[in-house]
Amino acid sequence: MRADPAGSNRRSPTPRPSARTADHRRSVINVRKAMESVAEHSVIESVFVRHRNALLLRGQFTPLYTDYYLHLMRHHIRHAPDLDQMLKDTLAMMALHLTARPWHETIAWTVNLRAPRLNLFVTGSSLKESITGRIFTHDVREPDRNFFYSQTTAPNLAEPRTSTVEVDGKDPVGWIQQFYRQSEQRPARAFRLPDEHFALVAAQPDCDLAWLDALDNDAVALLESTEETSRLETRRFRFDCGCTLERILPVLGGWRDRPDDLFQGAEAIRIQCPRCGADYQVTRDMLDG
Ligand SMILES: [Zn+2]
């Protein structure tokens, strides 16, 4: 979280009162409304592969990515294309992983990368049918290796369950495989398929590991015609943080009692949601309220 007194006017749009601008703005709003009305959840299917003893999770992520891009647009967030892809891939991996896990778990991953130096955060919950995340590129500690931190909370866990694994490379599809091997204690393979489809195949007890090892994109795409399968369940997810100004004001902590130091003469400051990067304007009277 960064309180940013100096940057309060950084993102204000430049007013350009021409008819063309007004038309353009109207059409952008219309497109946005249309996208909002068609944006649906991404549905993740869970399929048991009988004689191989493996669980196939798969989904198509265009609906979730549509909401993700609306969020970026709404909050004026821009990522370099490679970082944008990395966050989108990690969101897909999280949705597949949540579907492989019990319903009541809330899971958060933080990936601390050495190069490019960044923290990537994603979190989600099957029960809330939501998933969110963001990238931090400022004030990130430089690690000597890449680390993948996982935290699981659930009603039946007195303490969150955490694990840290070291990961190689910059590809989230590769990270998840390393995470399964080191932390979940069972192998899994992840696949990036055409048209924003992703799949995860996780070993179950007595899994045919040679078969799992030999899987490739084509084999995964054809799996239901080549193997005996049964569909277990579906879950759905949308990109949604659920944050509001009231919910994130507590991140200001002790600054709330020192408004002069916080505002430094500015009328308003901006604060960011630590989970999704949503940008909120805070004025002094909001703190009094
Ligand atoms: Zn948020």
Image: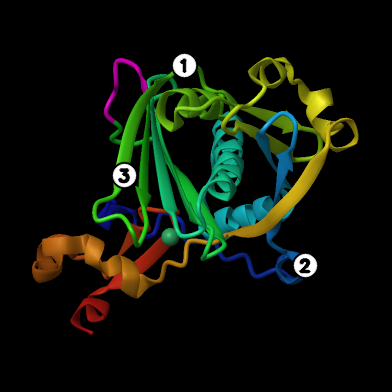
Residue 187 location, quadrant: top right
The C terminus: image quadrant: bottom left
Label 2: few (<14), some or many (≥20) within 10 Å?
Answer: few
Question: In terms of secondary structure, where does tag 3 sit?
Answer: strand
As drawn, is 163 to the left or to the right of 99? left
| Magenta part, dominant SS | loop
Q: Quadrant of ligand 1?
A: bottom left
Please state which amino acid type lies under the numbered disc 2: Val
- Is ligand 1 less than 8 Å from the beta carbon at label 3? no
Mark 3 and 2 residues: CB-CB less than 8 Å, in contact?
no
Residue topped by disc 3: 161
Q: Position of residue 6 (x, y in %)?
A: 28, 53
Q: Which residue sits at x=65%, y=58%?
A: 235
Which comes sooner in the sequence, label 2 or label 1? 2
Pick the residue in front: 42 or 257.
42
Which comes sooner in the sequence, label 3 or label 2? 2
Mark 2 and 1 residues: CB-CB less than 8 Å, in contact?
no
Please state which amino acid type lies under the numbered disc 1: Asp
Question: In terms of secondary structure, where does tag 2 sit?
Answer: helix
* Marks 3/1: CA–CA distance: 23 Å
In the rendering, which numbered label is found on residue 11?
none
* Marks 3/2: CA–CA distance: 37 Å
As drawn, is 231 to the left or to the right of 256? right
- Specify the segment rendered in magenta: 141-146
Residue topped by disc 2: 38
Residue topped by disc 1: 168
Q: Is residue 178 visible?
A: yes
